[in-house]
Amino acid sequence: MIELKNVSKWYGNYQVLTDCSTRINKGEVVVVCGPSGSGKSTLIKTINALEPIQQGEIWVDRVPVHDPATNLPKLRSHVGMVFQHFELFPHLSVTENLTIAQIKVLGRSADEAKQRGLKMLDRVGLMAHKDKFPGQLSGGQQQRVAIARALSMDPIVMLFDEPTSALDPEMVGEVLDVMVGLAHEGMTMMCVTHEMGFARKVSNRVIFMDVGGKILEDCTRDEFFNHPEERQTRTKDFLNKILQH
Ligand SMILES: Nc1ncnc2c1ncn2[C@@H]1O[C@H](COP(=O)(O)OP(=O)(O)OP(=O)(O)O)[C@@H](O)[C@H]1O
Ligand SMILES: [Mg+2]
């Protein structure tokens, strides 16, 4: 579903991604972790071309993302993306937030968009809040609306960039529950997260990135968590640090 071949990217002289290659099959859940500044957000953003690359190839569902001739709005319309900050439109109701892109980007009728949007809102357990504005919802609820909004577009893959890291601790669980549900339903997912409980529960693979934008590990969940002797020292140090607390 997603293939990265020798992807490199620079900001000026600074190399932010170094020769990154990986492949995510349909229905796979891949967790990306690593220290701050290692290029995790940059890597995930290259997949729907929110960040251009200077070298390598990126393929999403056989579409060449790196090819200047590719229709990027079309590609992005079916690659769901959920960020740390929910980025809902504050002046639109929850229902309007769920329908606007379906109408403007996918050309759906208002009725069809509403039906699909509310179905996804129900899926994340928030039907009772359909007429509220984002400011009237908790952070966890806003993030669940953001997930419902992405799902309303019938994505072929979902990309998450630290979707729970800006939330109060008691709201993390409700968002992770929605993500676990999606994983169990067979959604193809790439998730930048340090929620190792989530990674242990549903990921098929774990990618560990290190400073300079290098993929240091790309292994199965079992290899990542249960075979520390096979991991790089850098990975073990990182895991020890985040699992200590
Ligand atoms: N627009 C930009 N211009 C220049 N440098 C940038 C830009 N965006 C990011 N960087 C640099 O690229 C590196 C990778 O950033 P990125 O945000 O991808 O890291 P990250 O692994 O997601 O970090 P974090 O865990 O803090 O979110 C960092 O050193 C960052 O300072
Ligand atoms: Mg980041």
Image (cartoon, rainbow, N blue to C red):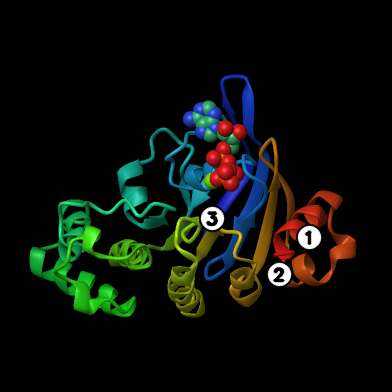
Identify the residue at horizontal 33%, vertical 66% (top origin).
Answer: 151
Of callouts 3 and 2, the N-terminal one: 3
- Badge 1 crowding class, 10 Å Cα cut-off, few under 14, some 14 to 19, many 20 or more, is few
Which residue, as the protein is rendered here, is positioned at the far top? 13
Residue 56 appears in the figure = no
Q: CA distance from mark 1 to mark 3?
A: 30 Å
Counting labels gives: 3
At horizontal 18% and vertical 61% (from top left) the residue drawn is 133
**Residue 73: image location, x then y, percent:** 31, 44
Q: Secondary structure at mark 3?
A: strand
Residue 99 rendering spot, x and y as whole percentages: 18, 61
Which residue corresponds to mark 3?
2
Say which amino acid is labelled 3. Answer: Ile
Mark 1: which secondary structure?
A: helix
User: Of circles 3 and 2, which is in front?
Assistant: 2
* Numbered circle sitting on residue 221: 2
Residue under label 1:
240
- The answer to whether residue 203 is visible is yes
At a point 36% along the width and 62% down the height, the residue shown is 139
Mark on residue 3? none
Amino acid type shown at disc 2 = Arg
Using the image, determine if residue 210 lies above or below residue 180: above
Residue toward you, 90 or 102? 90
Task: Give the CA distance from mark 3 to mark 2.
Answer: 19 Å
In the rendered view, does 145 fall on the left or right side of 195?
Answer: left
- Quarter of the view holding residue 81: bottom left
Foreground residue among 135 and 48: 135
